[in-house]
Structures are given as structure tokens and as C-alpha cells.
């Protein structure tokens, strides 16, 4: 074996055109014998023996490539850098080296494949764009890390990316296996991304004294999170550790399916959740208190909670007395409602609730779903597996149609104008009840087939 290489990355049959097989580290010689595509070494020494069981069962001679230290890109405080339509295989290193003073501004990564290493911009970086990329097989995908806490990345836009298989390989499993992780900062947009098999979809975090404000998370699809290596398996969340400015943080038109907590926050400034869907999660919407903060405030409108394992809403703020917190929840949809599907806790009481008991709660400054709907939203689920965002559209007879309230949003998840009917719909889909204009994002190579009478206006 070579003097120095990354033992977690052994490749079989590397060829042009990004053709290869990534082998899996085994635990013993017998484990390798029993599993095709595995490898093992007892000590990884230069004179040691490497055992390989090729994926096709044939001999490994001349077919195995090992990765040395790999590479990392060092920006040296440069500005106006663009990476366009490139494939990167980083072998454990990160796309951007985030060492001391390695910040950059006006950096764009568009249409790239980034495997085995994430994008970690340096402290103080700004005006960053990551768009139309595929990021996978690394410890964390995009991670705005700020250390010290007052040098957070700001003015960033992360859109139309597919981020998957984060924190699943041996050596990458970790509690921070976020598809996108953000520490502090402001003027951020995270939109139109797809996440699957990550330790969390999007995790926002604000340390004590670290401000986070004007951050918008919308039109994202998160499915099938995991809890490997201590990951929490949450969909979209905003956590904090202490007091700071946390204003203008909004989650809207997102879909989370098959996660632990679909959505969660513990901010002392109001966090808004509009027109989201939580499907087959443990808790659909979970709100916990931070003992270092003085309050917790959330506002929920037009959201759907479908088939949670435990609670539709879990409000657990035992550190706060009535009057020091606010949960303002109304015009939502909960299904099914049977038994204690809600949970309320403050410093004065702990109450698992039925839907009727939840609605009857009376707390100063709070609203408990007086105008919400407890009926099956009747998702279309055309594919039958709830693995596509289109499965969460609603038909004409859905009780969510025209049952919401105006929250100031102009279009739904797919670009349908709001409202299309008598009132805004609950959920991510505004059922089109007329000649409503739609928007579509067409990528290179897209084939557009139009039926008779269809009119396309390009602006």
C-alpha cells in the first residue's frame, strides 16, 4: 500500500466519464469474503496486506485505485469566482477550505457534482450562490460554519440542489450530518432543494450572541432522514443556544416526509411556519424551550400535519411561565386526530391533549387552532409511495381547498397564483380553479410537450 492515503475511499475500475465503483470498508477478512464490493486491512501499514472482494467477484489486480490526501480549494480571500458544470470527487476533503482568514465573496457554484466532500465557506464569506448542484456521500453537505460566532456567512443563496446520502458512509457518520447547516448570518435563501438520506434536511443554529435574521427556507422537499452517528433525523429546524437577534426567519411551502421532527424551533423571536407539510414524522411540529433564552414564539398558518407517530404539535416549554411565550397556531390541517395527538407544557402544567382539548387551551397571547381542519387532506399520491413532491398535491374535493388564510405569499410550491379560489388553500398546493398562470423552471435538455390550446408566454 502507498505511504499515505485515505482508507475510507477505495475505488474499483475508475474510468473516464466518472465511471467507478466505490468500495465499502469491511470489519474483518471474513466480512470481506462474505460481501462483494468490500475491502479490509488489519493495520493499513505500508507493508501490510489489503484484502479486496471486487463487486463482480473477479480478481482485483490492476483494478483498485486508492485516494491519497485528495484536494481542497483555497480561496485566499478572492472575489468573483465561478465554478460551472464541473464534477468534483474530493475524497474526504471539503470543496472550499475554511481555515483562518479564508473567506471569499461573490462565489458561484452552478451545475456541479460534489461527491465525498462538502461546501464549507470560510468565516465572513458573503454573496455566495450554490445552484443546480448534486452534493452527496460526505459528512455534511453545505455548511456555513462560524467560529468565532460573530463572523457568520451572510448574503447566500442555495437553490435547486439535490443533496443526498450525507453522513452515511463509515467515517462520515456524525451528529452534524446536515444536508445544509447554517450557523448565524443573515439575508439567506434556501429554496427549491431536494434532500434525502441525510441526518437532517436544513439545520439553522444560532449560538449565544450570534445573530441570525432575514433567513428564508421555502419550496424544499425533504424525505427519509436518518439518525446514524447521533444525527437527529429532523427535517427543517432552527435551534439556538442563548440569546441573540433571531428575527425574520420563515419556513414556507416545504414538504417533509419520513423524518423524526418534521419542523422544529426554539427561538425567542417569532419564527413563522406557513403552508408546510409534515408527513409520517414522529412529531410533525416540535417546539422546545432554550433555558438560556427568555421566551419562545412561533406562528403557524395553513400547515398540514399528516399521520405523525406521536404528536401533531409538541409544545414543550417548561422553562417559561404563561405570558412569556407565544404559540399562534390556526387555519391548519391535522389528520388523523384520535387520542392524545397534541402536547402542551409550560412551567405551570404538562398536558398531553386530544384535538378538542388542544383547542380549548387558554393561554395569554396564544391561539390554539380555532379555525383549523381535522380531516383527511386526500393527497393525490399518484406514485403511491409519497416519494415525489407531486404526491402532496390536493384534488378538488380536499377539505384543505379554500380553508386557509392569507399570509402574504404570492405563489404556491409550483408557481400557481394565490388565491386561485375563494381563499388560500392549506398546504403546499393551491388548487388551480381557473385560467391561472403558472411558472416553470426548465433546465438544459428539458423536452416541453404542449397540448392543443396551450399558450406559453416567455418573458
Image (tube, rainbow, N blue to C red):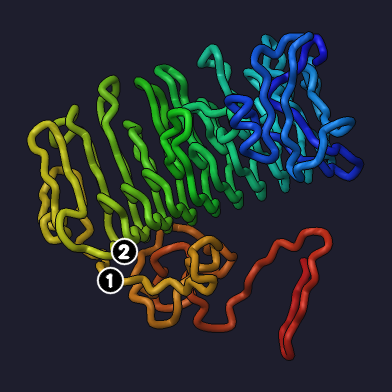
The number of discs equals: 2
| Mark found first going from the N terminus, 1 or 2 | 2
Decide if residue 412 is on the left or right side of residue 107. left
Q: Nearer the viewer, residue 441 or 65?
A: 65
The residue positioned 77% from the left and 66% from the top of the image is 459
Q: What residue sits right under mark 2 in the picture?
A: 333
Q: Nearer the viewer, residue 348 or 312?
A: 312
Q: Nearer the viewer, residue 332 or 44?
A: 44
Q: CA distance from mark 1 to mark 2?
A: 7 Å
| The residue positioned farthest toward the left in the image shown | 348
Which picture quadrant has residue 426?
Answer: bottom left
Kindly check if marks 1 and 2 are in contact, taking CB atoms under 8 A apart as contact: yes
Asked which secondary structure carries label 1, the reply is loop
Which picture quadrant has residue 134?
Answer: top right
Question: Where is 85 relative to 303, above or below?
Answer: above
The residue positioned 22% from the left and 58% from the top of the image is 369
The residue positioned 75% from the left and 63% from the top of the image is 442
Question: Where is 248 relative to 222, above or below?
Answer: above
Asked which secondary structure carries label 2, the reply is strand
Residue 376, image x, y percentages: 32, 71
User: Callout 2 environment at 10 Å: few (<14), some (14 to 19), or many (20+)?
Assistant: many
Residue 156, image x, y percentages: 64, 35
The residue positioned 84% from the left and 42% from the top of the image is 18
Q: What residue sits right under mark 1 in the picture?
A: 375
| The residue positioned farthest toward the bottom in the image shown | 452
Amino acid at each position: 500500500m502507498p505511504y499515505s492515503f485515505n482508507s475510507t475511499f477505495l475505488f474499483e475500475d475508475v474510468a473516464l466519464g466518472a465511471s467507478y465503483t466505490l468500495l465499502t470498508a469491511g470489519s474483518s477478512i471474513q466480512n470481506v469474503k462474505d460481501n462483494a464490493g468490500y475491502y479490509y486491512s488489519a493495520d493499513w501499514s505500508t507493508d501490510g496486506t489489503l484484502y479486496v472482494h471486487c463487486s463482480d467477484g473477479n480478481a482485483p489486480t490492476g483494478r483498485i485505485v486508492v485516494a491519497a490526501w485528495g484536494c481542497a480549494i483555497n480561496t485566499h480571500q478572492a472575489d468573483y469566482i465561478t465554478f460551472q458544470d464541473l464534477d468534483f470527487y474530493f475524497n474526504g476533503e471539503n470543496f472550499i477550505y475554511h481555515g483562518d482568514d479564508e473567506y471569499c465573496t461573490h462565489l458561484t457554484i452552478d451545475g456541479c457534482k460534489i461527491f465525498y466532500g462538502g461546501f464549507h465557506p470560510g468565516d465572513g464569506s458573503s454573496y455566495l450562490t450554490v445552484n443546480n448542484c448534486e452534493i452527496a456521500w460526505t459528512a455534511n453537505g453545505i455548511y456555513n460554519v462560524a467560529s468565532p460566532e460573530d463572523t457568520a456567512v451572510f448574503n447566500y443563496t442555495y437553490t435547486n440542489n439535490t443533496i443526498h446520502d450525507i453522513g452515511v458512509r463509515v467515517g462520515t457518520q456524525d451528529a452534524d450530518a446536515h444536508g445544509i447547516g447554517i450557523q448565524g448570518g443573515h439575508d439567506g435563501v434556501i429554496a427549491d432543494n431536494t434532500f434525502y438520506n441525510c441526518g437532517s434536511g436544513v439545520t439553522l443554529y444560532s449560538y449565544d450572541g450570534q445573530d441570525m435574521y432575514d433567513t428564508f427556507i421555502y419550496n424544499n422537499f425533504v424525505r427519509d432522514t436518518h439518525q446514524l452517528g447521533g444525527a437527529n433525523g429532523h427535517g427543517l429546524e432552527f435551534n439556538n443556544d442563548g440569546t441573540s437577534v433571531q428575527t425574520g426567519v420563515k419556513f414556507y411551502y416545504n414538504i417533509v416526509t419520513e423524518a423524526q421532527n418534521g419542523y422544529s424551533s426554539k427561538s425567542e423571536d417569532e419564527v413563522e411556519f406557513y403552508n408546510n407539510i409534515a408527513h409520517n414524522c414522529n412529531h410533525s411540529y416540535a417546539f422546545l424551550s432554550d433555558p438560556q433564552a427568555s421566551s419562545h414564539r412561533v406562528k403557524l398558518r395553513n400547515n398540514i400535519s399528516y399521520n405523525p407517530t406521536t404528536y401533531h404539535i409538541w409544545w414543550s416549554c417548561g422553562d417559561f411561565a404563561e405570558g412569556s411565550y407565544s404559540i399562534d397556531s390556526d387555519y391548519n390541517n391535522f389528520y388523523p386526530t384520535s387520542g392524545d395527538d397534541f402536547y402542551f407544557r409550560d412551567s405551570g402544567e404538562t398536558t398531553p391533549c386530544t384535538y378538542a382539548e388542544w383547542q380549548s387551551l387558554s393561554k395569554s397571547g396564544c391561539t390554539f387552532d380555532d379555525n383549523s381542519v381535522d380531516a383527511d387532506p386526500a393527497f393525490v399520491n399518484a406514485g403511491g409511495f409519497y416519494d415525489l413532491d407531486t404526491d402532496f398535491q390536493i384534488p378538488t374535493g380536499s377539505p384543505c381547498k379554500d380553508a386557509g388564510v392569507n399570509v402574504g405569499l404570492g405563489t404556491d410550491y409550483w408557481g400557481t397564483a394565490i388565491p386561485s379560489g375563494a381563499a388560500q388553500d392549506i398546504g403546499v398546493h393551491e388548487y388551480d380553479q381557473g385560467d391561472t398562470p403558472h411558472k416553470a423552471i426548465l433546465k438544459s435538455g428539458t423536452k416541453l410537450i404542449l397540448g392543443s390550446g396551450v399558450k406559453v408566454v416567455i418573458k
